[in-house]
Amino acid sequence: MGTDIKSEHIDIGGSNVLLVSVKGGRGVFGTCSVGHNMRRGDLTALNKVFYIGTDPVISLNCPNNGDKRTDRILSMCASYEGMAADIHTVMTDTLNRINRGDSLENGMRDLFMLLSDGVYTVYTSEYYPTDGNGTFFWGAYNIPHEVHGTAQYNRTIGKDKPYRPCFLLPGNTLDIYTTKKRATSDEAVKSRKYQGIVYHLAGLHSVLLKGHHGAVSCVAADIPFRCAVIEKLSDPYTVPFAVPMAAPAPEAEEPKEGEAAPVENAEPAPAAVAATEPHEGVTGFRSASVKVPIELMPKEMLRILIENRREAKPAHYANLVQKLNQVRRKTLSNNTIPRNIHEKCELMPDCEMIESAFAVESLSEPQLAALLSGDTEYEGKVIISPNFYSSIVTACNYLQFHDETRFVDFAISIMDNPELYATHEYIAKRIARLSNKKVYNFFKAALVNDEGRYEKILETADRYVKDYDVRH
């Protein structure tokens, strides 16, 4: 039986969402459970593995019986030697097609055929080539460790809020990195619309299927690493709602001694005020970035969602488990990721910044003005947090990832206010990550200004102005 691929564009709250259904897919990559972690002697930890073809690639140790609010312990599988040639060819051809101008649904069709059966949302988003903690992603998972931001339900963002994954896990080994390929990618990234293809795995993290050398080149050239993203739509969600119900009629009181009994049906009782009762049911299905109500889901896609499991063991499951216990032959190489790449990654946003950015729903101009005046409340309500410093940091996170223009204006206003002197150094370092003419002009003016209010930002300003002059 052939693979049936169907795509549909739907409108959710004014946003266009591309859904892709796969029926009869080859199941070349995905996630499956491989039992409990017997090596560590922890029977409460559930082990999962992300595989490509017949090879286990990434091991996911899920504590507390796979609790969705707990971060995962991740590592590259010791037996993985790299992506098979035929799969790599499909990835390369797909990236070339979408960069030549093909739409995502048409250009990625061959890649969709490699997926397991289900419904996926496909979109474009910028990724930071780090592990979410300032370390370049390629080579950051050689040792098993808990990775912040990999829980399915993020405690800071909240269970019910959608968010955009933006950190990476490698889909290939670091052994394939060469300076020759890097030189080719340095030129290629300058003209690409899409720099890579990723598959969402856990929380804020996705696996990079194609574009590893491009990630190095983009960091070096300060080019945004924009990717085509595949997310599986599988988790049902519920929005509680209320239904009207008749309030019980008041019971008739017994007449007191000496009083006449009330006349039955003499006058109808006044209408009872309608009461409400919480009623729960499945409202729709979601992935990390989108929630799709059932009424907007195409019927055929809804059928596929209901008929297929969220995770299923592939046909080569026994082979996967066998390879998990193997250790590949180590290779020696003099090729290493340049130091300047690691230094730039340390300046990129981390998990905590992203979490706080998606935890805030909105910030109005009056609320920002209140923060600039030193208040944490507006119209009697706490804007973000009772803690002023925490409020400033969270406001910057939100603005940086939702409206860069407002972020620049807000940050400059903070550094111009001597009463907010304690926050100046942090804000200067945050805004120095941007390549922005307005920021450049502000820092340049601060360097020639003798006012003491700029004392904490002078070092950052000097470095920013010098780097900006070299680049421009």
Image (cartoon, rainbow, N blue to C red):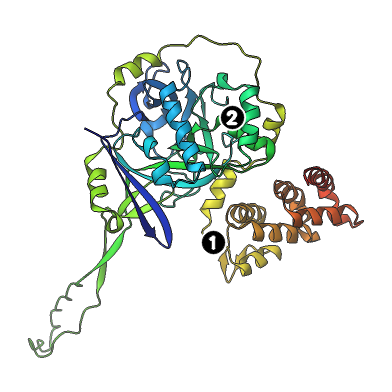
Depicted 365 relative to depicted 440: above or below: below
Residue type indicated by callout 1: Ser
Q: Residue at x 61, y 51 (%)?
A: 397
N-terminal-most mark, 2 or 1: 2
Between marks 2 and 1, how big is the CA–CA gap?
37 Å
Residue 91 appears at what percent x and percent y?
45, 32
At horizontal 72% and vertical 49% (from top left) the residue drawn is 435
- Count neighbours of disc 2 (C-alpha within 10 A) and say few if under 14, some if 14 to 19, many if 20 or more: many
On the image, the x and y values in percent for residue 78 come to: 47, 16
User: Which residue position holds label 2?
Assistant: 213
Q: Is residue 60 above or below residue 225?
A: above
Determine crowd level at label 1: few under 14, some 14-19, many 20+ residues with C-alpha closer than 10 A.
Answer: some
Q: Residue furthest top?
A: 329
Task: Label 2: state its secondary structure.
Answer: helix
- Residue reaching furthest front? 100
Question: Residue 432 appears at what percent x and percent y?
Answer: 73, 47
* Left or right for 424, reference 35: right
Mark 2 residue type: His
Q: Is residue 417 left or right of residue 228?
A: right
As helix, strand or loop, the secondary structure at mark 1 comes to loop
In the foreground, 412 or 308:
308
Residue 121 position, x and y percent, is 39, 46
Question: Looking at this view, is 375 or 92 the one in front?
Answer: 92
Q: Which residue is mark 1?
A: 362
Q: Residue at x 59, y 46 (%)?
A: 353
Comparing labels 2 and 1, the label whose residue is closer to the camera: 2
Is residue 147 in view? no
